[in-house]
Image (cartoon, helix red, strand yellow):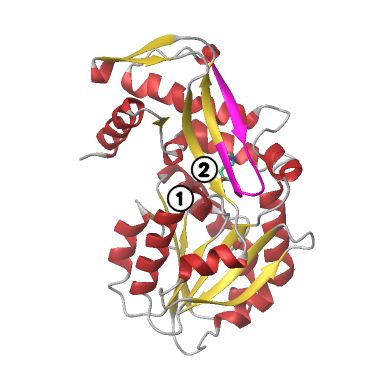
């Protein structure tokens, strides 16, 4: 199945459920990529700044924790590479130390990979970079064929978009493919109060709203749907006890939407929600629970000065 037909099938399945949902992985078309870049610039979206600070201030210590054998070439594989601005600090230090490595950014968006490759080649002419487009595990399967030791980067709280069961399966599967001593650097947003988390998903400039609504615009473009973008609202939700930020699209009125590619209409009640994103916030306890019996454990944890965000080194 091509990418586009998977998307169409997921839209059909998700909108046919009693509780409607569409996966957040479909946010990232070209416009979605741009809107996410803008979200990261919003003052309310603390995640990026916090993790940026960790990489800026603690890259040296992170590299020590990697326990790299200087004589052995390794592969630094980044899942969901984004714009690479955080990783840049790490790459700079690794190159300074003349360590032998290949940097392999992996992303579903070819557009993101093109941007990051161009940027990094310009900044670091000596960097050995080899971008790979695709879904994480498809690409990883190919990458795990090579014998070189691996360090996996999965930062930016991207794991948070997976529900706990999927996150569990993801980390266990990843661990199964790592050799003893190999590391995963996992960047996670931490559980904290609603007055900090909720605004991060509801910025006052309305960028997050546009990002959420763009999903409907994308369905209109790609599948000839007639979603009236004015008739849906961005609806963010977070409770500290649960620790999961959620985004919904809320139908402002009772309405029917036709999707040409499916030759099918979908009914929305007034106030009905489509779940479009979950962003799980973590603490050591939740992470350890997910890691139980995975053969991977927390080796070290790097925090920003506010203790909002953590980059964990997990070791097999
Ligand atoms: C890219 C998954 C980390 O969940 O915080 C930002 C995406 N969604 N604002 C997140 C996002 C709404 C982001 N991640």
Who is closer to the viewer here, 117 or 33?
33
Question: Is 195 situated above or below 67?
Answer: above
Secondary-structure class at tag 2: strand
In screen coordinates, is 110 left or right of 186? left
Residue 305 in the image: state x and y as whole percent.
79, 63
Q: Label 2 near label 1: C-beta < 8 Å?
A: yes
* Residue at left offset 51%, top offset 65%: 153
**Numbered range of the magenta stretch:** 232-246
* Residue at left offset 54%, top offset 65%: 287
Looking at marks 1 and 2 on the same chain, the residue that comes earlier in the sequence is marked by 1
Which quarter holds ligand 1?
top right
In screen coordinates, is 125 left or right of 135? right
Who is closer to the viewer here, 216 or 59?
216
Who is closer to the viewer here, 295 or 28?
295
Question: Is 21 situated above or below 191?
Answer: above
Which residue lies under the disc numbered 2? 278
**56 inside magenta stretch:** no
* Residue at left offset 55%, top offset 58%: 120
Which residue lies under the disc numbered 1? 163
Badge 1: residue crowd in 10 Å (few <14, some 14–19, many ≥20): some
Q: Quadrant of the C terminus?
A: bottom left
């Amino acid at each position: 199945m091509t990418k586009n037909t998977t998307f169409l099938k997921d839209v059909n399945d998700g909108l046919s459920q009693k509780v409607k949902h569409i996966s957040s992985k479909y946010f990232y078309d070209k416009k979605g990529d741009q809107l996410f870049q803008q979200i990261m610039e919003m003052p309310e979206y603390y995640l990026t700044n916090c993790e940026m600070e960790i990489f800026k201030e603690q890259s040296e210590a992170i590299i020590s924790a990697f326990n790299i054998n200087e004589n052995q070439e390794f592969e630094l594989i980044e899942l969901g590479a984004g714009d690479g601005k955080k990783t840049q600090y790490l790459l700079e230090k690794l190159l300074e130390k003349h360590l032998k490595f290949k940097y392999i950014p992996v992303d579903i968006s070819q557009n993101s990979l093109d941007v990051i490759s161009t940027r990094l080649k310009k900044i670091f002419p000596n960097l050995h970079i080899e971008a790979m487009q695709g879904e994480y595990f498809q690409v990883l399967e190919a990458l795990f064929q090579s014998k070189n030791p691996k360090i996996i980067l999965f930062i930016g709280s991207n794991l948070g978009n997976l529900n706990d069961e999927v996150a569990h399966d993801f980390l266990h599967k990843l661990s199964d493919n790592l050799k003893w001593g190999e590391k995963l650097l996992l960047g996670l947003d931490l559980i904290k109060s609603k007055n900090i988390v909720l605004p991060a998903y509801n910025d006052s400039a309305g960028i997050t709203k546009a990002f959420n609504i763009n999903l409907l615009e994308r369905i209109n473009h790609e599948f000839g749907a007639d979603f009236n973008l004015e008739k849906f609202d961005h609806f963010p939700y977070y409770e500290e006890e649960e620790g999961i930020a959620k985004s919904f699209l809320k139908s402002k009125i009772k309405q029917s939407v036709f999707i040409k590619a499916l030759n099918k209409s979908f009914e929305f009640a007034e106030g009905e929600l489509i779940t479009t994103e979950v962003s799980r916030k973590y603490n050591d306890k939740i992470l350890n629970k997910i890691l139980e019996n995975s053969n991977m454990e927390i080796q070290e944890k790097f925090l920003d000065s506010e203790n909002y965000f953590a980059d964990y080194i997990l070791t097999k």
